[in-house]
Amino acid sequence: MTAIASGLLPVFAVIFLGFVMKRRQLIDDAFWPAAERLTFMVLFPALLVVNTAGAELGRGASATVAAVIGGILIVAAACFVLRRPLGLGGPEFTSLLQSAVRPNVYVGLAAAAALFGGEGLALVSLCVGVGVPAVNIISVMALQRWGRNSGAGVSIWRAIAGHPLIIACAVGLALNATGLGLPPVIGPLLQILGTASLPLGLLAVGAGLEPRALRACGAGVLAAGTLKLMVLPAVMLAIAVGLGAGPHEAAIATVYGALPASASAYVMARLMGGDAPFLAASITATTLAAGISLPLILVILDFAGFLVP
C-alpha cells in the first residue's frame, strides 16, 4: 500500500500543479498549447522509441497486447449497446465511445515508471503502440459516421500513418525486431528528450482540466467514466489472465485499461463534429476520479498477488 501511494501520489501531484499553474496564470497561457505540441510531436515519441527498442518481448507481452486490443473492442461494443438506453444522438455517442476507450497515455507511462520501473515502462509503451492505432481507427470511423461533420472525407489511414506516437512505436519495434537497438548519439539524445516528456505532459494534463465542464455531467458522462475506469480494466485483466499472462503483465494491462480519458479526444471531437462539451466533462471527471479508482485497483491487484516484486 505504501509503495502504491508513493508511486501514484507524485503523478497526480504534478497534474494538480499544472492545474494550479494554469488557473493562477503563473505561466503565460500561450505556453500550454506549445508545451502540448512539443510533448506530443517530439518528447513523447522519443520516450516511446527508447522503451520499445529495448523491450524484452515474450509470451507475456503478446498476452498483454491481446488484452489491450480485446478490451478496446469489447468496451466499444458495449457503447453501441448503451447508446439507445442512454438516449444519445450521433455526436454524443461518438464522445461516449472516445471517452470509454481512449486513454491518457501520459498518466499511464508516468504511473508505470513509478510503480513498475523500466520493464513496466516498456510494456506500457508496447500497449501504447497497439492501443493508439486501434482507438484512432475506431474514433475516426465513428466520427465519420455519426459526427456532425459526417462524410467530411477525413482519411482514417492518413490519420493513422501520420500519428507521431504510432510512428515512434513502429520505429522502436523495428529497432527491437532487427536487434539493432538504439544507435550511438541518437540513442542518448532520445533518452534525454524522453526524460522531459512525462513531467511536461502531466503538467499539461492538469492545465487542461475544466472543473466548470462538470456541470454538464449527465448519464452519458457517468456511463463513460464507469466503462473507462472500471469495466475496461476488468475486461483487460480477464483477457490477460485467460491467455496465460504472468502477474506482472496482467497488472500492466489492467493499469493501462484504468487510465482516465485522453485530452486528444476533445481535439478530435471539436475538429470532426463530436460533442466537445461532453468530452470536456468526461476528461475532467475521469482524471479526477482516477486519483481514487487507480490506487484502489492497484490495492486489489496487490491483494490478489498480481503485483509481484
Image: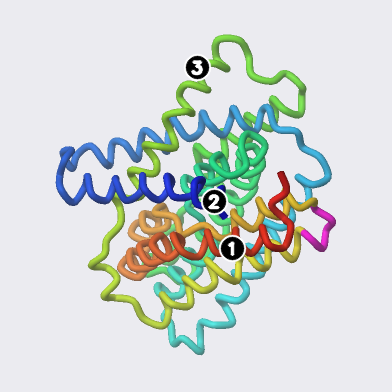
Answer with left or right where residue 36 lies relative to residue 139.
left
Q: Amino acid at mark 3?
A: Leu
Quarter of the N terminus within the rendering:
bottom right
Secondary element under disc 2, as helix, strand or loop, is: helix
Secondary element under disc 1, as helix, strand or loop, is: helix
Query: Disc number at residue 65?
Result: none
Question: Which residue is located at x 72 percent, y 55 percent?
Answer: 306
Q: Amino acid at mark 2?
A: Thr
Query: Hey, which quadrant is residue 283 in on the image?
Result: bottom left
Query: Disc number at residue 189?
Result: 3
Could you classify mark 3 by the number of other residues whose Cα lies within 10 Å: few (under 14), some (14-19), or many (20 or more)?
few
Residue 264, placed above or below residue 181: below
Quarter of the C terminus within the rendering:
top right
Residue 36 coordinates in the image, percent (x, y)? 34, 40
Measured Cα–Cα span from mark 1 to mark 3 = 36 Å
Q: Earlier in the sequence, mark 1 or mark 2?
A: 2
Q: Nearer the viewer, mark 3 or mark 2?
A: 2
Question: Which residue is located at x 53 percent, y 39 percent?
Answer: 165
In this rendered view, identify the residue nearer to me: 191 or 146: 191
Reading the image, the residue beneath label 1 is: 297
Question: Is residue 225 on the magenta stretch?
Answer: no
Measured Cα–Cα span from mark 1 to mark 2 = 14 Å
Answer with left or right where residue 216 lies relative to residue 167.
left
Q: Amino acid at mark 1?
A: Ile
Q: Earlier in the sequence, mark 1 or mark 3?
A: 3
Residue 86, placed above or below residue 188: below
Question: Which residue is located at x 74 percent, y 55 percent?
Answer: 66
Reading the image, the residue beneath label 2 is: 2
In this rendered view, identify the residue nearer to me: 28 or 70: 28
Range of residues picked out in magenta: 241-245
Measured Cα–Cα span from mark 3 to mark 2 = 34 Å
Q: Earlier in the sequence, mark 3 or mark 2?
A: 2
